Image (cartoon, coloured by chain):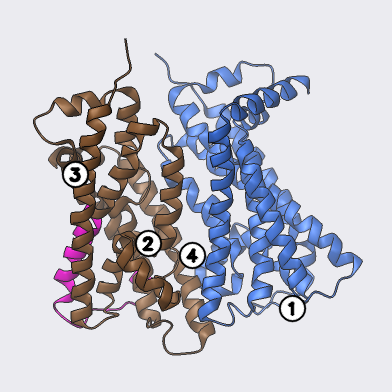
Amino acid sequence: MGAGFRRYSTYRQATVAGAFTNTVFGFLRCYVLLAVAAGAGTATVAGYDPARLATFVWFGQGLLAVVLLWGWTELADRIRTGDVVADLLRPVHPVTRYLATDLGRAGHAVVTRFVPPVLIGPLFFPFYVPHRWTTVPLFAVSVLLATVLCFGCRYLVNATGYWLLDIRGPMILWALVSGVLGGLYFPLRFLPDALVVPLWVLTPLPSLFQTPLDVLVEIDPTPRQLWLVVLQAAWVVLVLVLCRVVQRRAERRLVVQGG
Amino acid sequence: MRAYWALLRGQARSQTSYRLSFGIDLVSNVWATALDVFTVFVLFAVTRTLGGLDLHEALVVTGMSACAFATGDMLVGNIERITLYVRTGRFDAVLVRPLPALPQLVLLDLPLHKLSRAAFGATVYLVALGAADIAWTPGRALLAVIAPVGGVVFFGAVFVVTASVAFWWTESGEFGNAFTYGGRDFTSYPVSVYSGWFRNAFAYGLGFAFVSYYPALALLGKPDPIGLPGWVGWIAPLVALPATGAAALIWRAGIRRYTSTGS
């Protein structure tokens, strides 16, 4: 974990550039969603009032780099080059090892990428302050679960490299699906219920992004909030088990190329 | 000219030789823009107007932006790989050839798989023009053609400027995305949804308002709620000219600054 933190703290300029870009997109998305709320002419849209929408957008922009939806190809790169052999020789299981590094990376992102948009947003837009004390610890747990879950999904996408070598196809599919069905482009509750409920229960995608944000803006009463987090935890267990199964099967058929 | 043609043909051959990968890229690129359009539909499921425009009118703005961005991205977008060339010093190889650097770089990486997205963007634009209630005149027809062309040039200039940042700031990473992809998002919606200094900076300071919003208003014959006069939409595509000039200046200054990596 420490190694992951230190490694990402060496890319200082890229971190600044990333935080800047997240902030610009925060403005863009926030204005659009607030215009939707204004155009609807009702006090709330799909349960969100303007303060909740703005908080949803800005915490979402901060969360983006913490859960890291996109841009992790380390495992796939190592599979292609054959370096992955070194991972298999280590006494720690590869899934555990990569997860620990990823949590270190996420810890670094919380400090450098989460904080700037979360501080800048409320300066220019309304901000929803949680009313229940339970919300804040629940949000922290939910962010942690989302990070682990997102790591698991990324690991699975990368692990297709054991079979495909070139993972561009799965990678692009993942980037498209996770963004829109995770809740990044618009809150998923804008969609009809008949779509949202199956999406939430049958896929891990809303648990990656939408759940922590919905927990934070208290869109549901406490029991429902808790259930969403429990659902998230169930997906974490399932996906991590799947990672280990896939890893075991891959190790049996892995042929490393090289001279 | 023959040299450029050779570069282009080489690219076409190498990119299409992996048929499956090329096919996947063709399809997935359409999806990226399709999701942007889908998002507009979802937003209109919960609201009736966005920044004073209804769904059909807003889609003219979105379609024009998608068409301009996708084409500009295909033609010039890969210039953003200059960060890689500058960091590794491979830019030397481009500079020593007896051709100007910019067209070389553009043709060296021309992503043919993005053709599908440009075609999709153009389709969205055409469908939106058909669905919106436009009182067609010869002038409007001309504007409907010229505006996306101006947008393509404008986005091309934005790509060149943000890529040139690499000459001064090698590790700029995602910085350019705020203006390229950010510009696409900004121009996908009516400028009237934004406000304050942010709107002034993006819409008028950087000129993004003139890419899709004002031409669309002129086509639809609607007044601007922000208060600019009606003729603005008719001359809006001219914003591509100063943008191109600025891009050329910044690019030249950047090249002069380039000092390779040394060993």
Give the blue chain's letter: B
* Residue B151 lies in quadrant: bottom right
Name the residue type under label 1. Lys
Q: Residue at label 2?
A: A182
Label 1 element class: loop
Q: Which residue, as the protein is rendered here, is positioned at the far left? A: A91
- The subunit letter for the residue under badge 2 reads A
Q: Which mark is residue A28?
A: 4
Name the residue type under label 2. Gly
- Local packing at callout 1 (Cα closer than 10 Å; few below 14, some 14-19, many 20+) is some
Residue A150: x %, y % from top left: 28, 52
In the figure, is residue B119 to the left or right of A174? right
Give the brown chain's letter: A
- The subunit letter for the residue under badge 1 reads B
Magenta stretch in the rendered image: A121-148
Label 2 element class: helix
Q: Are marks 3 and 1 in contact (CB under 8 Å)?
A: no
Front residue of A163/A56: it is A163
Q: Which residue, as the protein is rendered here, is positioned at the far right? A: B138
Of badges 4 and 2, the one in the foreground is 2
Query: Residue B158: in sight, yes or no?
Result: yes
In the figure, is residue A129 to the left or right of B218? left
Q: Residue at label 3?
A: A99
- Local packing at callout 4 (Cα closer than 10 Å; few below 14, some 14-19, many 20+) is many
In the figure, is residue A106 to the left or right of B227? left
Front residue of A177/B155: it is A177
Residue B100: x %, y % from top left: 68, 25
How far apart are the two marked residues, 3 and 2, measured between alpha carbons?
A: 21 Å
Q: Residue at label 1?
A: B222
Q: Which badge, 4 or 2, comes first in the chain's sequence? A: 4
Q: Residue at x 29, y 63 (%)?
A: A207
- Local packing at callout 2 (Cα closer than 10 Å; few below 14, some 14-19, many 20+) is many
